[in-house]
């Protein structure tokens, strides 16, 4: 007597089925999503887990995991990769906020001769002043980490192309006199 699966059937709506079929033959989508879409389509059509595993040259565990995830969270969510644990964050949110607030200030306001922050200058400033600000986790902050913190908040203080700063308080009067001279030269 053949084995009868106790796993519930995967019910896929027509719209989702069309989307899965389009994704399963895609050449631009990630390979893992294309394979998972094919596996879910095959299971929804009644194919066995073993047959799906043979067709996709993988093992039954991987097919079962994909199907179980689709049954638990839905077809679209099952296609995405699960988040990985990764290394725990060592820089707390308040320290990151302090770095961002520094990046929003001008280096000249903090005693530097530079007009704009570079990641190297900002990292050096943070390392020098982190203990006084109470952020000991930033003692070994590098340029790459500064870049990641700024990129997470879409800040690019080192890539400003143009800015306008009024420095001369008498600029308006000087501009008017220069323009009058040009006008007189034009009339002559």
Image: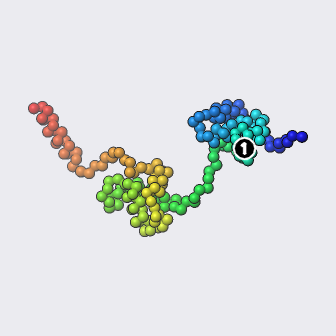
Question: Counting other residues with Cα less than 10 Å from the Cα at mark 1, is it few (<14), some (14-19), or many (20 or more)?
Answer: many
Q: Quadrant of the C terminus?
A: top left
- Residue 148 lies, in percent from the top left, at 48, 53
Identify the coloring.
rainbow
**Residue 19 shows in the view:** no
- Tell me which residue sits at (73%, 40%) in the image: 54
- Residue 14 lies, in percent from the top left, at 71, 31
Is residue 99 left or right of 26 when viewed as pictured?
A: left
- Tell me which residue sits at (67%, 38%) in the image: 37
- Comparing 176 with 59, the one in front is 59
Q: Tag 1, which secondary structure? A: helix
Q: Quadrant of the N terminus?
A: top right
The image quarter containing residue 123 is bottom left
Is residue 42 left or right of 97 when viewed as pictured?
A: right
- Comparing 16 with 185, the one in front is 16
Is residue 80 left or right of 50 when viewed as pictured?
A: left
Q: Is residue 66 above or below residue 93?
A: above
Mark 1 = which residue? 63
The image quarter containing residue 45 is top right
- Comparing 16 with 58, the one in front is 58
Q: How many marks?
A: 1
Extreme-right residue of the structure: 1
- Residue 22 lies, in percent from the top left, at 64, 32
- Tell me which residue sits at (59%, 34%) in the image: 27
């Amino acid at each position: 007597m053949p084995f009868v699966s106790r796993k519930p059937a995967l019910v896929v709506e027509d719209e989702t089925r069309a989307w899965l079929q389009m994704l399963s033959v895609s050449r631009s989508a990630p390979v893992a999503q294309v394979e998972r879409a094919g596996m879910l389509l095959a299971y929804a059509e009644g194919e066995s887990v073993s047959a799906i595993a043979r067709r996709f040259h993988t093992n039954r565990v991987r097919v079962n995991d994909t199907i179980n995830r689709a049954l638990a969270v839905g077809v679209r969510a099952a296609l995405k990769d699960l988040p990985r644990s990764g290394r725990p964050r060592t820089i707390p949110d308040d320290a990151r906020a302090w770095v961002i607030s520094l990046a929003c200030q001008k280096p000249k306001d903090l005693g530097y001769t530079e007009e704009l922050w570079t990641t190297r200058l900002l990292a050096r400033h943070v390392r020098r002043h982190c203990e006084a600000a109470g952020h000991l986790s930033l003692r070994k902050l590098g340029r790459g980490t500064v870049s990641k913190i700024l990129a997470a908040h879409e800040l690019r203080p080192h890539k400003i192309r143009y800015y306008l700063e009024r420095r001369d308080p008498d600029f308006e009067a000087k501009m008017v006199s220069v323009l009058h001279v040009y006008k007189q030269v034009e009339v002559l």
